[in-house]
Image: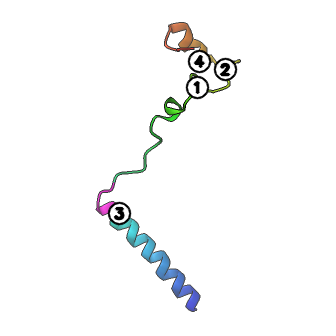
Amino acid sequence: MLEFLAGLVVFSLAVLLMAVGVLAGRPSIRGSCGGLANVAGAETECVAGCTRPCPNRKARAARGLDAT
């Protein structure tokens, strides 16, 4: 019974702290800062290069929107 009560207290404390975080208006979790744009040496989306581009990539390249 003691383990149950300890677990309930820990779980309740976690929920309470999450609620306080929401009420404080902290910013939400965001993605990375730039992704592959900030990786040194990555000129293309995949570092190995695209040997078989997908149809969407082919269409973007045909319109001139793709750098590769």
**Quarter of the view holding residue 23:** bottom left
Secondary structure at numbered mark 1: loop
**Badges 3 and 2: C-beta atoms under 8 Å apart?**
no
In the foreground, 52 or 55:
52
Q: Amino acid at mark 1?
A: Glu
**Which badge, 1 or 4, comes first in the chain's sequence?**
1
Residue 57: assigned label:
4
Using a 10 Å C-alpha cutoff, classify the residue at mark 4 as few (fewer than 14 neighbours), some (14 to 19) or many (20 or more). some
Q: Amino acid at mark 3?
A: Gly
Q: Amino acid at mark 4?
A: Arg
- Coordinates of residue 45 in the picture (x, y in percent): 58, 25
> As drawn, which residue projects farthest toward the front?
40
Q: CA distance from mark 2 to mark 4?
A: 10 Å
Residue underneath mark 2: 50
Q: Residue at x 50, y 29 (%)?
A: 37
Residue underneath mark 1: 45
In this rendering, the label closer to the viewer, 3 or 2: 2
Secondary structure at numbered mark 2: loop
In the foreground, 45 or 25:
45
| 67 magenta-colored | no
Name the side, left or right, on which 31 lies relative to 1. Answer: left
State how many labels appear. 4
Using a 10 Å C-alpha cutoff, classify the residue at mark 2 as few (fewer than 14 neighbours), some (14 to 19) or many (20 or more). few
**Which badge, 2 or 4, comes first in the chain's sequence?**
2
Q: Amino acid at mark 2?
A: Cys
Q: Which residues are magenta?
A: 22-26
Residue 32: assigned label:
none
In this rendering, the label closer to the viewer, 1 or 3: 1
**Which badge, 2 or 1, comes first in the chain's sequence?**
1
Q: Main secondary structure of the magenta part?
A: loop
Q: Residue at x 57, y 14 (%)?
A: 68
Residue underneath mark 3: 21
